Structure formats: C-alpha cells, structure tokens
Image (tube, helix red, strand yellow):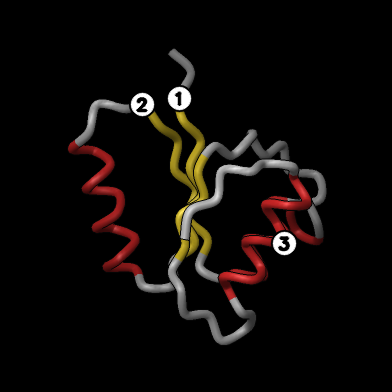
Amino acid sequence: MKPVEILLVEDDLAQATLFGVMLKMGSVTYNLKVISDGLEAEDYLFKRKAYKSVCSPDIVLVASFFFCPSMRVIDKWKDIRDAIGHGNYQS
C-alpha cells in the first residue's frame, strides 16, 4: 500500500514530535514532512522559491497549527484548497 503523504505545519518542535508519536501509534503507513512556517508550507505545496525544483509528492493531508503571525491560516488554507481543486476541507 502506498504511504499517505502528510504535511505538518508546526513551529513548535514539541507539538511536531507529539504529532509524529501519535501517527506511529496508528496502523497507517505514512511519510511526514514538517515545515515550521505557513508561508514556507505554501511555497512547498506550490513548488515555489526553495522548493521550485524539489520533487514533492502529492500531499493527502495537511495538518496545521492555527496561529501564524505571517498569515491568516484559515483563509490561506481555504485558498490553497480551492487552488489545488480539493473539496475535502474541515475546520
């Protein structure tokens, strides 16, 4: 079975570690990419700037913290969802 590709946007190392521990407790095979900034995550998803030539996988799940000084997270994730054409958004 192909691993689930997960992007975690989290600037707190302890929270990112806890998320990883929780994933390990499950039975799903996954690849986890952790990025600490919302704007950088957007660059990763849209293959811009430092991620322009990176072969990033198709992300199945984006997990995000909801406080980000560089952007209004809820609105930004809705914009990203609309841009990539996925309608499975839960707030």
Secondary structure at numbered mark 1: loop
Q: Earlier in the sequence, mark 1 or mark 2?
A: 1
Tell me the residue that label 2 is attached to: 29
Figure check: 20 above or below 12: above
Question: How busy is the neighbourhood of tag 1: few (under 14 within 10 Å), some, or many (20 plus)?
Answer: few
- SS of the residue under disc 3: helix
State the separation of the CA atoms marked 1 and 2.
5 Å
Please tell me which residue is depicted at 64% across the width and 34% down the height of the picture. Answer: 58
Amino acid at dot 3: Asp
What residue appears at the point 72 percent right and 36 percent down from the top-left corner?
55
What amino acid is at disc 2?
Thr
Q: Nearer the viewer, residue 38 or 85?
A: 85
Gap in Å between the C-alphas at discs 3 and 2? 28 Å
Which label number is shown at residue 79? 3
The amino acid sitting under disc 1 is Pro
Which one is in front, 20 or 75?
A: 75
| For the residues bearing labels 1 and 2, Cβ distance under 8 angstroms | yes
